[in-house]
Each structure stands twice: as structure tokens, then as C-alpha cells.
Image (cartoon, helix red, strand yellow):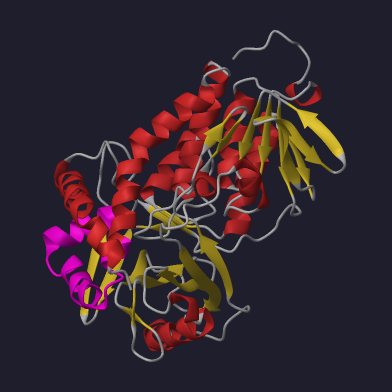
């Protein structure tokens, strides 16, 4: 979409409204503003806010940041993933592929988000901090937003406000009730291993009573004297509603404290919810991206890369043709991600069964061949376009889990 209006993009009536200034919303704003669109972004927080997160960036996320020309020299370079299952430990470098770079990073969200939204500002987007925006509806069509007591109208509103809340309720875009979701909690601690080149993931996570948890514990070295330590769990486990995340992270911390020589927690552990589905991700006048669209890998809880990619996608489609952008966006996201994410959701019901969980995850790192597939899954390197063993295995798994899915759901923990 090339505008013939000679006014600066930020001074015109907006072409595009974005609710949320996190990675997904910023990616939309950067791409659209660079393409000549007038973009207005709203976030209810203030500039520099810290978004609770694991801070890990997969090679896929690094590829998206490269596409956006974001300087990542401030981030700590990560060469691969160290996977632990019981007494088995395997350290694998990120694979070299034609699509993604062979490295990831750890970049605390305060710095990552600032770098992205600063790039959006430099591109000409107008960012309004401390203003909560809600969709402005005329019938079922979103015609803009209300924020700070004012109405703003535009042809497209992009919902990028993270885990689904009031905006999702207004649009009917909440998570699918019977599908799994996740909870995670993290804190920071000083460690002499803060510059370790590997992410570490303990796949056989247990609570303080020794109960196996479908999820994992992580140690993500930030390269700044600290490590991000956290745990995540899926809703498919027995007694999930009784799970105490604070006790779970303390149990995991006691496990890794000696090897990482951890200092005291630098802040109170903070938790967040991980939606892994959405009833709708587009409608007349709007599209949801990133976490707001449920684009989170159920097998690792990662969503920054999907947020960046979906943000760029909706911006590109809008610039090409505003009238067809949302429908094509929904179709394209479905082709890229739906099969893999559906497999992940079905897998989460599988490992919700304690016997399968206890034995299956040891297999995941038991041999080099299987571990490489696990690496691809944990690194978000698998989707509809993935060639080779990982892609084939996931396609076969999707078919097998499709057959088993009704039984898994009926016998869910």
C-alpha cells in the first residue's frame, strides 16, 4: 500500500491501529510504518516496562529479528540446547539450516522490547504509552479503538496485547475451553555461569512431593551476571489447579543451585499464563497476532518468534491489500503453524498421563537421532515447511495423535 499523501505518516489519520507494544505489536508497526503506512500503537504500560518471560530467543526468533534489521549485539549469544532427562544429559548445537541462523540468544524482555519499539518509533509509528485501548465495534465489525477517552478509527486494528483478556472477550477470541494452556514462573539470580553458551532445559521436572510435571525447568544465561531461572507446566496434569508454582520453582532451584552456584533470588518470582489456542484470530476489521492468537508452542511455551512472524505477516498483507489482509492472514497462519501447534496440543494430553510422561521424555534425549528431533521441536524449528527427519516425524506424529486424541481426552488426568 503506497500512499500518495505527502504528510508524515504519524500526522495523518492512522491506516493501522495496534493494541500492544510487545514484540508482536512492534513487529507489525515496524513493517507497516517502513512500508509507508500511518501506524498508531497503544500500550497500557509505560515505556521500559518489564514483561515477565523466560527471555530465551530461538534461532527462529533471531531470524525474524534479522528480517526486521534489529541490532542484537546487546543480547547474549546462545549456541545450542542442553537437555536433561533424569540422569541423562545431552548437549546439542543449534542446527544449520537454510531458513534460520545457527544460534539463539537470551535477551531480557525489558531490553528486547525497548529495541523493537524504538525501531517502530524510528520507522514513523506513533506509540501511545499508558493508554489502554479497547476495540470500537459497529455491529460485528471493528472500526477502530477507544483509548484515553477518545475514539480512533482505521481500516485495520491488530490485536497484540498478549495473553487473552478483555479485548479477546469483546471479539470472541478467547482460548478454546477444552484445549490445554500453560503456566510459568521465573526469577533471576547471579551465577558465575551467566555467560554459558547453552540454554538448559530439564525435561523431567518434579514438584516438592516428587510428582512428575508435564513441562520443564530452565536455566537461561543472560550474559550480564545473571541467569533466568524458571519452570512451566501444562494444564493436562492431574491436580493442575492445586499446583503451587512458587514451591515448584523453589524445588527446581534447589536441584540446579549447586551446579550453577546460584546467588539469592534477585526479585520475587513472577508467574504468567500461556494461551495455546484461540477461538478466532481474525474478523471484520481486526486480526490477532502472537499470544493473542494462541500462537504458542505447547511443547516449550515459546511464542516470541511466532509473534514476530505473525506481526510481519499481517503488516505485509495489509500493505499489499487492506481489503483482503485479514482473511489471507488467517489462511497463511493456518498453513504455517496450525498442524504443528495442533500436534503439540495433542502431545500435551499424552504427557498428561504420568506413566507416559515418566518414560517418554527419557526417550526424547536417549539417542542422538531422537534428541535432534527434540532439539528441533524445542527450538521452534519445525513447521509445515520443515524438511528432513524432524518434519517427517512430526507429520507422522500428527496422524498418530489424531487417532489417539479422543482416547487421550477421555482419559485425561
**Residue in view at x 52 percent, y 19 percent:** 324
> Quick check: is 373 in the magenta stretch?
yes
Q: Quadrant of residue 146?
A: top right
Provide the major secondary structure of the magenta segment: helix
Q: How many marks?
A: 0
Is residue 63 something that shows in the picture? yes
The single residue placed furthest to the front in the displayed view is 410
Of 319 and 355, which appears nearest the observer?
355
Give the position of the N terminus as an image quadrant: top right
**Residue in view at x 58 percent, y 44 percent:** 172
Q: In the figure, 210 relative to 33: above or below?
A: below
Q: Is residue 355 left or right of residue 6?
A: left
The single residue placed furthest to the bottom in the displayed view is 209
Q: Which residues are magenta?
A: 348-377
Q: Quadrant of residue 410?
A: bottom left
Q: Position of residue 253 (x, y in %)?
A: 45, 84
Q: Is residue 49 left or right of residue 218?
A: right
Q: Position of residue 115 (x, y in %)?
A: 61, 46
Is residue 72 something that shows in the picture? no
Q: Is residue 79 left or right of residue 38?
A: left
Q: In the figure, 370 relative to 64: above or below?
A: below
Q: Position of residue 44 (x, y in %)?
A: 75, 51
Of 402 and 114, which appears nearest the observer?
402
The single residue placed furthest to the right in the displayed view is 149
Give the position of the C terminus as an image quadrant: bottom left
Q: Is residue 112 left or right of residue 396?
A: right
Q: Position of residue 373 (x, y in %)?
A: 20, 55
Of 331 and 228, which appears nearest the observer?
331
Amino acid at each position: 500500500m503506497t500512499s500518495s499523501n505527502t504528510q508524515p505518516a504519524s500526522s495523518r489519520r492512522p491506516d493501522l491501529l495496534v493494541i500492544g507494544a510487545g514484540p508482536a505489536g512492534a513487529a507489525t508497526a515496524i513493517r507497516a510504518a517502513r512500508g509507508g503506512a500511518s501506524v498508531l500503537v497503544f500500550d497500557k504500560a509505560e515505556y521500559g516496562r518489564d514483561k515477565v518471560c523466560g527471555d530465551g530467543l530461538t534461532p527462529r526468533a533471531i531470524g525474524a529479528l534479522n528480517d526486521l534489521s534489529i541490532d542484537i549485539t546487546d543480547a547474549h549469544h546462545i549456541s545450542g540446547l542442553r537437555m536433561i532427562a533424569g540422569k541423562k544429559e545431552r548437549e546439542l548445537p543449534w542446527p544449520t539450516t537454510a531458513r534460520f541462523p545457527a544460534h539463539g540468544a537470551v535477551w531480557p524482555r525489558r531490553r528486547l522490547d525497548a529495541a523493537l519499539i524504538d525501531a517502530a518509533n524510528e520507522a514513523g509509528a506513533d506509540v501511545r504509552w499508558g493508554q489502554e485501548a479497547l476495540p470500537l465495534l459497529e455491529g460485528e465489525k471493528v472500526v477502530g479503538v477507544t483509548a484515553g477517552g477518545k475514539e480512533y478509527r482505521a481500516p485495520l486494528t491488530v490485536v497484540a496485547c498478549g495473553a487473552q483478556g478483555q479485548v479477546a472477550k469483546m471479539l470472541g477470541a478467547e482460548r478454546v475451553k477444552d484445549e490445554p494452556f500453560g503456566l510459568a514462573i521465573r526469577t533471576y539470580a547471579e551465577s558465575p555461569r551467566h555467560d554459558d553458551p547453552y540454554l538448559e532445559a530439564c525435561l523431567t521436572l518434579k514438584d516438592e512431593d516428587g510428582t512428575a510435571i508435564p513441562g520443564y525447568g530452565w536455566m537461561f544465561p543472560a550474559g550480564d551476571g545473571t541467569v533466568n531461572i524458571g519452570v512451566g507446566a501444562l494444564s493436562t496434569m492431574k491436580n493442575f489447579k492445586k499446583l503451587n508454582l512458587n514451591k515448584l520453582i523453589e524445588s527446581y532451584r534447589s536441584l540446579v543451585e549447586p551446579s550453577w552456584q546460584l546467588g539469592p533470588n534477585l526479585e520475587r518470582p513472577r508467574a504468567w499464563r500461556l494461551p495455546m489456542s484461540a477461538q478466532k484470530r481474525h474478523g471484520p476489521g481486526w486480526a490477532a497476532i502472537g499470544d493473542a492468537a494462541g500462537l504458542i508452542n505447547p511443547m516449550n511455551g515459546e511464542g516470541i518468534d511466532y509473534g514476530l512472524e505473525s506481526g510481519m505477516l499481517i503488516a505485509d498483507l495489509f500493505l499489499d491489500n487492506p481489503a483482503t489482509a485479514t482473511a489471507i492472514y488467517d489462511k497463511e497462519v493456518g498453513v504455517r503453524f496450525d498442524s504443528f501447534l495442533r500436534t503439540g496440543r495433542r502431545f500435551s494430553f499424552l504427557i498428561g498421563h504420568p506413566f507416559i510422561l515418566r518414560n517418554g521424555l527419557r526417550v526424547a534425549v536417549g539417542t542422538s537421532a531422537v534428541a535432534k528431533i527434540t532439539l528441533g521441536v524445542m527450538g521452534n524449528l519445525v513447521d509445515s515447511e520443515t524438511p528432513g527427519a524432524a518434519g517427517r516425524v512430526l507429520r507422522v506424529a500428527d496422524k498418530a495423535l489424531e487417532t489417539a486424541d479422543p482416547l487421550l481426552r477421555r482419559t485425561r488426568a
